[in-house]
Amino acid sequence: MARSLDGLVLAPVADQAPGQVGTRTRFTYHEKDGEIWAEYTGGDVVRGYLVGTRAGDRLDFRYVQLKHDGTTSSGHCVSTVVELPDGRVRLEETWEWESQPGSGTSVVEQVTAHDS
């Protein structure tokens, strides 16, 4: 199993559709006893939260976010935790909106101090 996500900051490696999470978005993860949660902000997202569980290298969580235009949206995501050769963490994600149409895949990777 890859190491704990607690305290790590991750960012998408590519932009999603306009008005959604993008490369300027930062996720700050927390983990304790199989629980996983994070706050995120940046780009078009004013404030976002995710909460769920971790079993081995599998995360299962729901997310909700507020955008700059005042709209909110929510969805469900399942991620696989991968440890990269340089020791950083990558999440390979499959997500689906629950508040609106749409689904897809994305990748977020740990941001190092000089990347932020």
Image (spheres, rainbow, N blue to C red):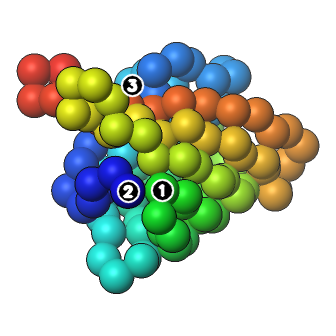
* Mark 3 surroundings within 10 Å by alpha-carbon count, few (fewer than 14), some (14 through 19), many (20 or more): some
Q: For numbered disc 3, what is the local secondary structure? A: loop
Disc tally is 3
Residue in the foreground of this view, choosing between 91 and 49:
91
Residue pictured at 64% horizontal, 54% vertical: 78
Q: CA distance from mark 2 to mark 1?
A: 6 Å
Residue contact between numbered discs 2 and 1, judged by CB atoms under 8 Å: yes
Sequence order check: which comes first, mark 2 or mark 1?
2
Callout 1 touching callout 3 (CB < 8 Å): no
Write down the quadrant of residue 27 in the picture.
top left
Q: Nearer the viewer, mark 1 or mark 3?
A: 1
Q: Amino acid at mark 2?
A: Met
Marks 3 and 2: which is nearer the front?
2
Q: Nearer the viewer, residue 43 or 61?
A: 61
For this view, does 109 lie left or right of residue 55? left
* Cα–Cα gap, marks 3 and 2: 28 Å
x and y percent of residue 50 in the render? Answer: 51, 62
Residue 98 located left or right of residue 58: right
Residue that appears at 21% across and 33% down: 87
Task: Look at label 3 and name its amino acid.
Answer: Arg
The image's mark for residue 57 is: 1
Q: Which mark is residue 24?
A: 3
Q: Give the residue drawn at x 39%, y 25%.
A: 24
Q: Residue furthest bottom?
A: 33
Along the horizontal axis of the image, is 59 left or right of 32?
right
